[in-house]
Image: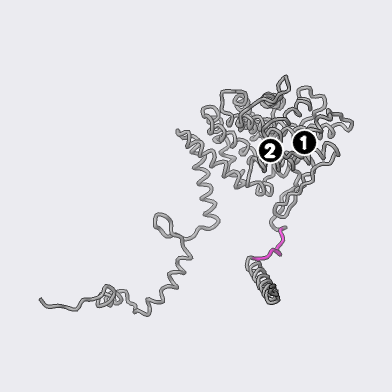
């Protein structure tokens, strides 16, 4: 059997024929890298293997709207977990962008979905629905549509808040949503709402013998949420002559709670009562007893090792400010910078309102401070700043890179000289 010459896998006539078919030589094929890399930089490979052009801003907007519409439609699906996920997805979209024109025609669908989930859902689903309700009102702003949504949802939130058979998580979220909707909406349920919230956190009051009730952490979170929502409403009412409000001695009893969130909310409520009293009546007298001052000072200097280090630090920082206001009438002085603007929090009421919206909007707070008319009106920021007013002298990315490179070079030369001058010590 004749033995022929074996050809390599990459050589021989097969490789030659391949080049002839393509119509290029070996040298030409070596220069194809530039075109391949260039093409890759101008396109994107999706998971399905298709190559498409990179999306621009318009396409990103379309994708965002499509995702939001899918989430809104998902609120009415049969799966409880699916409804919960959809509620959370809509909430995430509402915090990321200010889009009132996109949801104004879908407000009834959203309101009906929230109401249905609050009625038929349980636990996490109710909590997610209650979390979405204030976001919907913040998106729509101060208008008749918001007032109508508040009138539709507040009775249901009141019912869940009073129902002890519901989970503490759902009741806590409903307490907070109830406070925010009563704050934003033009309704006649403000007194009833505050009374209901007061009944919830009253369970943390000391017992008749002065002992502190032993409550679970999730129940403490419920009481703290109710007290925080009650404090938000305290910023818009006249407390003088209002017999339905608790006295300072009752609120000071909450300072003895073993749970940090309850103590913090109680200190905030006491300070707001004092500030509101001084605001509406210069001769306002309150029950600032020596026992209360002693409690505030102890919390401002707390060093008990059985508390977590982070909790001690947070508590001391907050109660130092509270004690300073109670004793010396020194208001807070906090400056919040966002974009080209500055927000001054110079009263406890304004700080409470800012903190409330931070809790609602989370990481999207700065965006809404810049664009949301409702927030700007509440926090007295004035008209929105036009993009034409933004400084055009902002450094480009290349300029910042060159400046950092020059600074790095100068620093390296300086350190090299210092290294040469080192003296060996024997």
Relative to the observer, which residue lies in front, 295 or 36?
295
* Mark 2 crowd level (few <14, some 14–19, many ≥20, 10 Å Cα): some
- Residue 393 lies in the magenta-colored region: yes
As drawn, is 236 to the left or to the right of 412? right
- Tell me the tag on residue 4: none
The range drawn in magenta is 390-396
Name which quarter of the figure residue 187 lies in: top right
Chosen colour scheme:
one colour
Give the position of the N terminus as an image quadrant: bottom left
* Mark 1 crowd level (few <14, some 14–19, many ≥20, 10 Å Cα): some
For discs 2 and 1, the disc positioned in front in the rendered view: 1
Residue 318 horizontal/vertical position (percent): 74, 40
Name which quarter of the figure residue 331 lies in: top right
Answer with mark 2 or mark 1, whichever residue precedes in sequence: 2
Q: Looking at the image, is 51 positioned above or below residue 28?
A: above
Name which quarter of the figure residue 7 lies in: bottom left
User: Dot 1 corresponds to which residue?
Assistant: 298
Relative to the observer, which residue lies in front, 264 or 337?
264
Q: SS class of the residue under badge 2?
A: loop
Q: Residue furthest top?
A: 208
User: Dot 2 corresponds to which residue?
Assistant: 142
Callouts 2 and 1 close, C-beta under 8 Å = no
Residue 382 horizontal/vertical position (percent): 75, 47
Residue 391 horizontal/vertical position (percent): 72, 61
Q: Residue furthest right?
A: 283
Q: SS class of the residue under badge 1?
A: helix
Residue 145 horizontal/vertical position (percent): 64, 35
Q: Residue furthest front?
A: 426
Q: Looking at the image, is 128 positioned above or below residue 43?
A: above
């Amino acid at each position: 059997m004749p033995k022929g010459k074996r050809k390599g896998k990459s050589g021989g006539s097969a490789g030659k024929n391949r080049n002839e078919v393509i119509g290029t030589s070996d040298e030409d094929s070596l220069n194809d890298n530039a075109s391949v890399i260039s093409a890759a930089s101008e396109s994107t490979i999706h998971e399905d293997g298709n190559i498409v052009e990179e999306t621009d801003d318009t396409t990103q907007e379309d994708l965002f709207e499509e995702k939001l519409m899918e989430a809104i439609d998902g609120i009415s699906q049969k799966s409880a977990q699916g409804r919960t996920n959809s509620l959370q997805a809509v909430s995430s979209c509402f915090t990321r962008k200010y889009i009132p024109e996109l949801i104004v025609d879908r407000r009834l669908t959203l309101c009906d979905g929230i109401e249905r989930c609050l009625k038929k859902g349980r636990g996490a689903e109710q909590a997610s629905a209650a979390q979405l309700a204030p976001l919907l009102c913040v998106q729509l702003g101060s208008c008749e549509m918001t007032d109508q949504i508040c009138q539709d949802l507040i009775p249901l939130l009141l019912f869940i808040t009073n129902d002890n058979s519901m989970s503490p998580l759902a009741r806590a979220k409903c307490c907070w949503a109830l406070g925010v909707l009563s704050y934003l909406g033009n309704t006649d349920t403000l007194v009833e709402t505050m009374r209901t919230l007061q009944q919830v956190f009253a369970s943390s009051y000391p017992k008749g013998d002065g002992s502190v009730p032993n409550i679970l952490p999730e129940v403490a979170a419920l009481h703290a949420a109710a007290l925080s929502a009650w404090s938000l409403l305290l910023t818009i009412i006249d407390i003088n002559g209002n017999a339905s409000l608790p006295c300072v001695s009752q609120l000071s009893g909450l300072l003895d709670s073993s749970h940090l969130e309850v103590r913090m909310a109680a200190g905030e409520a006491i300070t707001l009562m004092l500030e509101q009293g001084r605001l509406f009546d210069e001769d306002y007298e309150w029950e600032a007893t020596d026992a209360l001052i002693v409690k505030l000072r102890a919390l401002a200097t707390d060093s008990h090792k059985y508390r977590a280090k982070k909790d001690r630090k947070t508590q001391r920082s907050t109660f130092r400010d509270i004690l300073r206001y109670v004793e010396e009438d020194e208001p807070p002085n906090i400056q919040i910078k966002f974009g080209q603007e500055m927000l001054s929090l110079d009263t406890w009421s304004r700080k409470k309102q800012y903190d409330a919206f931070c809790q609602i909007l989370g990481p999207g707070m700065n965006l809404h401070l810049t664009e949301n008319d409702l927030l700007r009106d509440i926090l007295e920021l004035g008209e929105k700043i036009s993009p034409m007013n933004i400084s055009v002298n902002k450094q480009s990315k290349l300029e910042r890179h060159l400046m950092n490179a020059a600074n790095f070079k100068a620093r390296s030369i300086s350190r090299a000289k210092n290294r040469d001058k080192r003296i060996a010590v024997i």
